[in-house]
Amino acid sequence: MPTRAAPAPAREVRTRVAVRSLDAFFAEVHAIKNVSLAFEDRSVTAIIGPSGCGKSTFLRCLNRMHETIPGARVSGSVELDGTDIYAKRSNPIRVRQHIGMVFQRPSPFPTMSVRDNVAAGLRILSKRPARKETDAIVERALRRAALWDEVADRLDSSALGLSGGQQQRLCIARALATEPGVLLLDEPTASLDPLSTQRVEELLYELRKDMTVVIVTHNMQQAARVSDTTAFFLSGELVESAPTRVMFTTPADPRTEAYITGRFG
């Protein structure tokens, strides 16, 4: 009788970011309401929900971008590897070195070359790398963003000469240059054509191998394709979070089912 092969060892699950009792405000407007949610290392989490439900606000709270808006404030905690990024001695600039962010519309710096756009984030490092090391970092970031082969001979050209999809991958490369452990993506393909969207989605499969990715998307098919876990927000509240396969087949809350099936939103 043939012997049965031993099961492969399960991957160790480690929480990279832990959100606890998070509330976010725009002056007196209560935008995020008592949200607690954990993000695993080396995984992709999709944040879904109708327009105005707080998805982008929540994302901006994860790297202290929310507080850059006049009158905005946050209570609760966001822990990165066990350390609260909202602690009094926490430096927001250093936080963003470890938790990168890419916005909905491609936003390359218009007066900078492709190379300088990618290297821009290195300016926040306490010890700025020398030219040769910077060149190596730029190449590595562009390769990770699946853009190197397309721009290797255009590094000194204006970033505005790239297509929209290339500009978005350039922004991803810029975020990757500081070697963040977490990457936040706010509707990164909303303004892209289908081919560019596919390239960004393929990139997420590579990035999840060594980092935590959180993506806000209004596209249900995209969430189902790219994420391991999906969290559904409604009116600033987290309704539920579950493995993506479970969320899209047997959601626990009827509001989630109504949204996924297109009955509202």
Image (cartoon, rainbow, N blue to C red):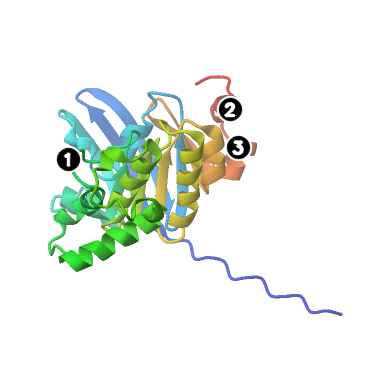
**Taking 151 as reference, is 49 left or right?**
right
Point out the frontmost of discs 2 and 3.
3
Tell me if residue 253 can be seen.
yes
Which x, y percent locates residue 230?
50, 41
Instruction: Name the spot of residue 129 as percent of width and height, x first.
Output: 16, 65
- Which structural element holds mark 2? helix
How far is mark 1 from mark 3, CA to CA? 44 Å
Of residues 200 and 151, which is closer to you in this image?
151
Where 250 falls versus 229 (above or below)? above
Could you tell me how far apart the alpha carbons at marks 2 and 3 are, in whole angstroms?
A: 12 Å
Mark 3: few, some, or many residues within 10 Å (few <14, many ≥20)?
A: some
State yes or no: discs 2 and 1 in contact (Cβ < 8 Å): no
As drawn, is 148 to the left or to the right of 68?
right
Q: Answer with mark 2 or mark 3, whichever residue precedes in sequence.
A: 3
Q: State which tag comes first along the sequence, 1 or 3.
A: 1
Residue 49 location, x and y as percent? 46, 29
Question: Which one is in front, 84 or 3?
Answer: 3
Residue closest to the far top: 264
Q: Are marks 1 and 3 in contact (CB under 8 Å)?
A: no
Q: Which mark is residue 111?
A: 1
Up-down: is 148 above or below 66? below
Query: Counting residues from the N terminus, which is met first, the one under dot 2 or under dot 1?
Result: 1
Measured in 3D between alpha carbons, the distance from the residue under mark 2 to the one under mark 1, in whole angstroms, is 49 Å
Q: Under tag 1, what secondary structure? A: loop
Visible residue check, residue 250: no
**Is residue 3 placed above or below 186 in the rendered structure?**
below
In the rendered structure, which amino acid carries the disc numbered 2? Answer: Pro
Query: Mark 3 is on which residue type?
Result: Phe
Residue depicted at x 40% and y 31%: 191
The image quadrant of residue 31 is: top left
Residue corresponding to mark 2:
254
Q: Residues within 10 Å of mark 1 (few under 14, many from 20)?
A: few
